Image (spheres, rainbow, N blue to C red):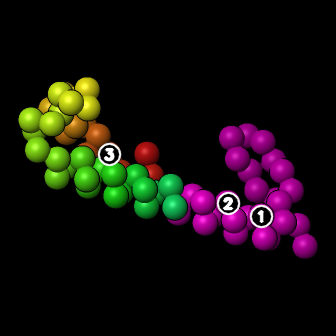
Amino acid sequence: MQLSIQYRFKIEMVSPKRLLKKFYLLLMLWRRNYRTRRQLADLPEHLYQDIGVSTPQVNREVKRCFWD
């Protein structure tokens, strides 16, 4: 059985197994985004300069949704 999905205006035939793998990888990416943004939020301000970001940049990044 093949499923058709549309992604960025391109239609491709994808097997259910491959579709599940893509979905799993997407969930892992979202989880990583959530986790790293929480870690960034917990970082003391004096370390921002060490990683090369400013306070407004950190605030913008922390406010982003995990799927961005």
What amino acid type should be assigned to the residue bearing mark 1?
Arg
> Label 3 vs label 2: CA separation?
23 Å
Residue 27 in the image, given as x and y percentages of width and height: 53, 63
Residue 25 in the image, given as x and y percentages of width and height: 60, 60
Foreground of the two, 50 or 21: 50
Which residue lies under the disc numbered 1?
Answer: 18
Q: Splitting the image into 4 quarters, where does residue 51 fall?
A: top left
Quarter occupied by the N terminus? bottom right
Residue 65 in the image, given as x and y percentages of width and height: 35, 51
Which residue lies under the disc numbered 2?
Answer: 22
Front disc: 3 or 2:
2
> Label 1 vs label 3: CA separation?
29 Å
What amino acid type should be assigned to the residue bearing mark 3?
Arg
What amino acid type should be assigned to the residue bearing mark 2?
Lys
Mark 2 neighbour density, 10 Å: few (under 14) some (14–19) many (20 or more): few
> Label 1 vs label 2: CA separation?
6 Å
The boundaries of the magenta stretch are: 1-27
Q: Which mark is residue 66?
A: none
Mark 3 neighbour density, 10 Å: few (under 14) some (14–19) many (20 or more): few
Q: Which mark is residue 64?
A: 3
